[in-house]
Amino acid sequence: MGAVLAYIGQVYAVEKRARKSGVCGEDLRLLRAAAARPVVNELHEYMLCIQSELLPKSDAGQAAAYILKNWPALTRYLEDGDLGIDNNRTERSLRGIAVGRNNWTFLGSDRGGRTMAILRSFVTSCELNGIDSFTWFRDVLGRISACSIQKLEQLLPHRWAALLQG
């Protein structure tokens, strides 16, 4: 299975190169087609070749079967430059929820749980937009009472930075 990891390493090297160069969208799709697709095709051929050599119930055999069964989903990112190669960013954002689960068992009430969920969504939105959540909360709490309901949307994290500059 070392060869599989080598193929995967080559594919991620293409993604790293794109990220460093700021390549995205259609340009990323084209880069993937030129640089990653040939590697992915080689990986697929390799997986088909070794599958018959692996015991089906072994860890390696199960991994090969999983990869081949899910091949269209695993390679979908090659067709769309706006798709990520993996979902690591999403999984990292959920880690805090998994870690906090035991702490949140004692929120006190359904209302407390709902409030925590709302606050957590604001914190995550700030993180995704590169904003310090404490600074955002402090500023928004100071502005919200004077803000009309029609302009309330401007205080959301993804619009807040532009509001400060304007």
Image (tube, grey):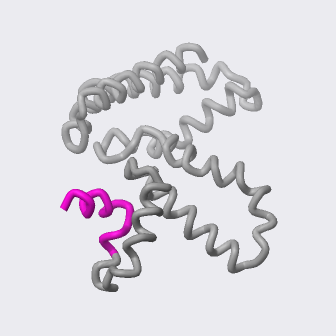
Q: Is residue 159 magenta?
A: yes
- Relative to the observer, which residue lies in front, 150 or 135? 135
Give the x, y percent position of residue 144.
40, 76
Q: Main secondary structure of the magenta part?
A: helix
Residue at (49% x, 55% y) in the render: 134
Q: Quadrant of the C terminus?
A: bottom left
- Relative to the observer, which residue lies in front, 8 or 116? 116
Residue 101, placed above or below residue 146? above
Seen in the image, is 58 located left or right of residue 143?
Answer: right
Residue at (32% x, 62% y) in the render: 160
Q: How many marks?
A: 0
**Quarter holding residue 19:** top left
Q: Is residue 95 magenta?
A: no
* Numbered range of the magenta stretch: 153-166
Farthest residue to the bottom: give it.
149
- Relative to the observer, which residue lies in front, 149 or 62? 149
Give the x, y percent position of residue 51.
60, 25
Give the x, y percent position of residue 25.
24, 44
